[in-house]
Image: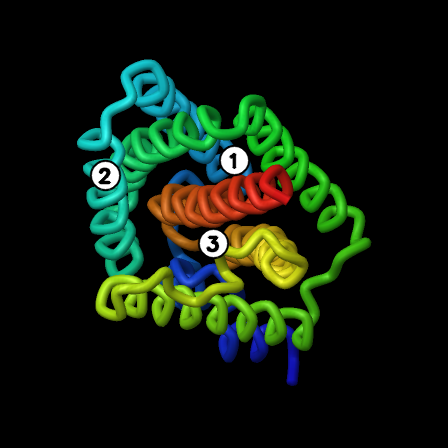
Amino acid sequence: MSKHQALDTFGRSGNPVFGSKFDGDPQFKDLPASQKMTLDGTVNKTGILLLLCFITAAVSWNNPNPVLMYTGLGVGFLIALVTSFKPTVAPTTAPIYALAEGLFLGGITVMFEAAYPGIAIQAIGLTFGTLASLLVCYKTGIIKPTENFRLMIVSATAGIALLYIVNMFMTIFGGGSGIGFIHSNGLMGIGFSLFVVGIAALNLVLDFDFIEQGAEDGLPKHMEWFGAFSLMVTLVWLYLEILRLLAKLRRG
């Protein structure tokens, strides 16, 4: 199987937002250069989304309010669904997603910080440190998104998503605390969180490759926003999992 065949088969990324939206299409080859996706354009738009997220996170951090936090969570989830199924709206929906997630992240970070002082700066530092490290590893070829690597990450990501869905239903309808080891601060619980953090982080490598291939294929300009949005989804997931892991280590 060639690289491009593998990309088509596995959707190029473990990030569920990407799906197969970046698959090459001959109709894009005739687009003028100014209307094509570029790496620089995607990087700039990722920076814009991060800035918007930090702005609303600061608002939620300084004005802790469950209504703000859960509104951000709900709006962010709905916007993510819409954008995933219709990438052409990403120039409008991606900034809204970043603003909504900022409200949620700021609120939940306040809760963690109240219980474990200093955890916020640790989680932020580890998230962006991981992003920078994996970008270097990807660009230098230390980590290569081979077909087997891609399949492993996609499968693991799907498995984690399924486990979280089962846990949510058990919590809501079972009247209990869900699947015990997901929340445990014992060796199994910490090991699980380490595994999930690792999978979330490795999704970044697939996402870098995914965006690079999209730029090489000359996809339409709106895909820069879609690529930036998709990276945000992975970063939000990674940050939340790091928060959970640090909290378990503190409890332990």
State the mark number for residue 218. 3
Q: For this rendering, which residue is in front, 93 or 36?
A: 93
Instruction: State the image coordinates of residue 101 (x, y, percent, origin top left).
Output: 33, 36
Are the two marked residues, 1 and 2, in contact with CB atoms closer than 8 angstroms?
Answer: no
Residue drawn at x 52%, y 52% as measured from the top left:
211
Chain-order first, disc 1 or disc 2 = 1
Task: Check disc 2 and give the amino acid type.
Answer: Tyr
Task: Identify the mark at residue 43; answer none if there is no mark.
Answer: 1
Q: How far apart are marks 1 and 2 (CA)?
A: 29 Å
**Image vertical order of residue 90 relative to residue 55, above or below:** below
Assess disc 3: are there few (<14), some (14-19) or many (≥20) residues with their C-alpha within 10 Å of its C-alpha: many
Quadrant of the image occupied by residue 143: bottom right
Secondary structure at numbered mark 3: loop
1 vs 3, front mark: 1
Crowding at mark 1 (Cα within 10 Å: few <14, some 14-19, many 20+): some
Question: Taking 78 as reference, is 49 left or right?
Answer: right
